[in-house]
Amino acid sequence: MDELKASYTECKRLNALHGKTYYLATLLLPKSKRPYVHALYGFARYADEIVDDLTSTLTVDEKSEALGTWGNKILTGLKLGTSDDAVGRALIDTVSRFHIPHAHFEAFLHSMTMDLTVQEYQTYEDLMEYVYGSAVVIGLEMVPVLGALDTGAYESAKKLSIAFQLANFIRDVGEDLDRGRIYLPITELAQFGVTRQMLEARVLTPQIIQALKFQIARVRQLQAEATPGIKMLEATSRPCIEAASTLYCGIVDEVEKIGYDIFNRRAKTSTARRLRVASAAFLKRLTVSN
């Protein structure tokens, strides 16, 4: 039991260290739900660090081997119901408690593997294979923990997860280029006269601005379609997800505020705004019993 507690503590540490906004939103959940959210985040973060740590001296092949070794260990642990991994113990306990499909974690690891070899996506449909594993399954994993009052909560979770991921793609164009990747679909960029070479030049042009506006509109549409589904969750979970929706999708507001110059400035939500959103959600949370 002490080892399980230590595993949950490690997952919480990873969440607090790497997911500032995510961690803040998690604090809006009842205390009884938070450890399980930390466990799900800890799994995703650990895998992501293997793939995307820019300070790592590992080659692509070495990262692939490390991810495969660790991922297979976790998946085996899920099947056996036990693990000696610092993150795996909490994950397996959470998955067991909430009957979360193991396929979600297989899909996530598949997308992390794609990051090691795929440098661009031709169409939106192509991109969705990656987004399903890197984002959608995380939303689907979360729903049982948050408490679904209606099966429609799962469809809304899919849309909101896609919106979160696409907002990150828009903000991180420059950072992703450093890793040799472009997540904005090539054919959609081409509609506005934007090429990979133009993005790699890192010069903001009217064409790039129009392409970004197109992507931002999609984020807002997905958010709007997902919002009614928040009411399909247990009342104690709603303030957290409402805050997360505001802050994560709000990234595109910040992109607009910097004049779309995602090459020279990082669009980020100010501490003041995060606190305003969190405070409003916390007050709402107080009106709901645990």
Image (tube, rainbow, N blue to C red):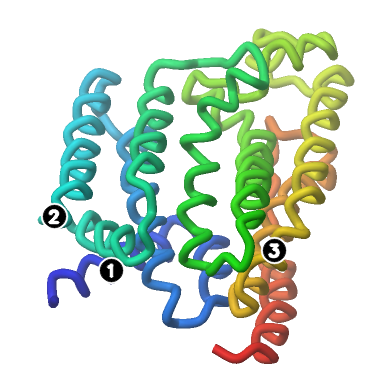
Q: Are marks 2 and 3 in contact (CB under 8 Å)?
A: no
Does residue 256 appear in this view? yes
Q: CA distance from mark 2 to mark 3?
A: 34 Å
Q: Are marks 1 and 3 in contact (CB under 8 Å)?
A: no
Which amino acid type is shown beneath numbered disc 3?
Answer: Ile
- Residue 35 image offset from top left, x and y in percent: 37, 71
Would residue 130 appear left or right of 194 to someone viewing this image?
Answer: left
Q: Which residue is mark 2?
A: 83
**Is tag 1's residue or tag 3's residue first in the polypeptide sequence?**
1
Q: Is residue 54 visible in the rendered structure shown here?
A: no
Front one among 200 and 100: 100
Q: Residue at x 74, y 67 (%)?
A: 273
Q: Amino acid at mark 2?
A: Ser
Residue receiving disc 1: 8
Residue drawn at the location 48% of the way across and 49% of the way down:
138
Q: Quadrant of residue 69?
A: top left
> Which numbered dot is residue 144?
none
Residue 235 in which image quadrant: bottom right
Instruction: Judge the density around disc 1: few (<14), some (14-19), many (≥20) Cα neighbours within 10 Å.
Output: many
Quadrant where the C terminus lies?
Answer: bottom right
Residue 150 position in % (x across, y down)? 63, 62
Judge whether 38 appears above or below 210 on screen.
below
Relative to residue 213, is residue 79 depicted above or below?
A: below
Callout 3 secondary element: helix
Mark-to-mark CA distance, 1 and 2? 13 Å
